C-alpha cells in the first residue's frame, strides 16, 4: 500500500479528519493528503505547515522525556481553538501528523494511526 493510499484511508476513516501528512524530521512533507472539504474550512494549507512548525516542538518534547526518563515519544495531541493535531512517530526520522476539526473523532483518528503504523514502516 502506498503512502498516499494510507493517508487517504486515515483521513476518510475518521469523522472530522481534514488531512494527514507524512513528515521528515527536518519538517519537509514526504507525502500529504487533504480532504475535499479542507478548503471550505480554510485548513487546506495547515496540515503540512503544522508538521513543519511543530517539528521542533516534538524534538523538545523528546528531550524533556529523556531528561525525565520517560522513554521515546510515541504520540502527541495538540488541541487548538481551530483544530486538533495528532502527531505519531513512525521512526526516528519520520512522523505522521493528522489534522481534525475541533469536533472531529479524535479516538478514531488515533486508532487509525496505530492501525496503519506497521504499513507505513514497511513502505519506508
Image: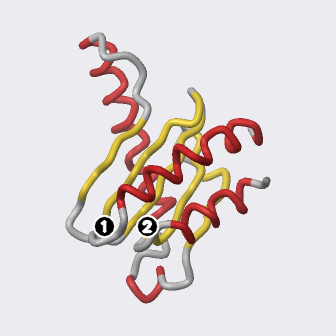
- SS at mark 1 in the image: loop
Q: Which residue corresponds to the image point at 56% horizontal and 56% vertical from the top-left?
A: 21
Circle on res. 46: 2
Q: Residues within 10 Å of mark 2 (few under 14, many from 20)?
A: some
Q: Which residue corresponds to the image point at 33% horizontal and 29% vertical from the top-left?
A: 60
Which numbered disc, 2 or 1, marks the residue that appears first in the sequence?
A: 2
Image coords of residue 43 (percent x, y)? 42, 75
Q: In terms of depth relative to the viewer, which is nearer, 54 or 11?
A: 11
Q: In terms of depth relative to the viewer, which is nearer, 104 or 60?
A: 104
> Quick one: quadrant of the C terminus?
top right
Image coords of residue 114 (percent x, y)? 52, 43
Circle on res. 63: none
Question: Coloured how?
Answer: secondary structure
Residue 65 lies left or right of residue 20; in this view the side is left
Image coords of residue 119 (percent x, y)? 70, 43
- SS at mark 2 in the image: helix
Q: Work out which residue is located at the far left of the displayed protein and give it.
A: 81
Verify CB contact (< 8 Å) between mark 2 and mark 1: yes
Mark in the foreground, 2 or 1 = 1
Image coords of residue 14 (percent x, y)? 47, 67
Q: Residues within 10 Å of mark 1 (few under 14, many from 20)?
A: some
Residue 93 lies left or right of residue 50; in this view the side is right
Amino acid at each position: 500500500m502506498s503512502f498516499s493510499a494510507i493517508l487517504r484511508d486515515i483521513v476518510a476513516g475518521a469523522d472530522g479528519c481534514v488531512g494527514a501528512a507524512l513528515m521528515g524530521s527536518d519538517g519537509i512533507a514526504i507525502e500529504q493528503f487533504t480532504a475535499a472539504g479542507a478548503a471550505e474550512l480554510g485548513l487546506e494549507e495547515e496540515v503540512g505547515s503544522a508538521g513543519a512548525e511543530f517539528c521542533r516542538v516534538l524534538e523538545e518534547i523528546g528531550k524533556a522525556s529523556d531528561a525525565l526518563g520517560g522513554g521515546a515519544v510515541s504520540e502527541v495531541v495538540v488541541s487548538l481553538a481551530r483544530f486538533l493535531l495528532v502527531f505519531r512517530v513512525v521512526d526516528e526520522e519520520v512522523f505522521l501528523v493528522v489534522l481534525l476539526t475541533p469536533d472531529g473523532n479524535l479516538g478514531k483518528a488515533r486508532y487509525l494511526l496505530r492501525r496503519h503504523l506497521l504499513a507505513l514502516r514497511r513502505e519506508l
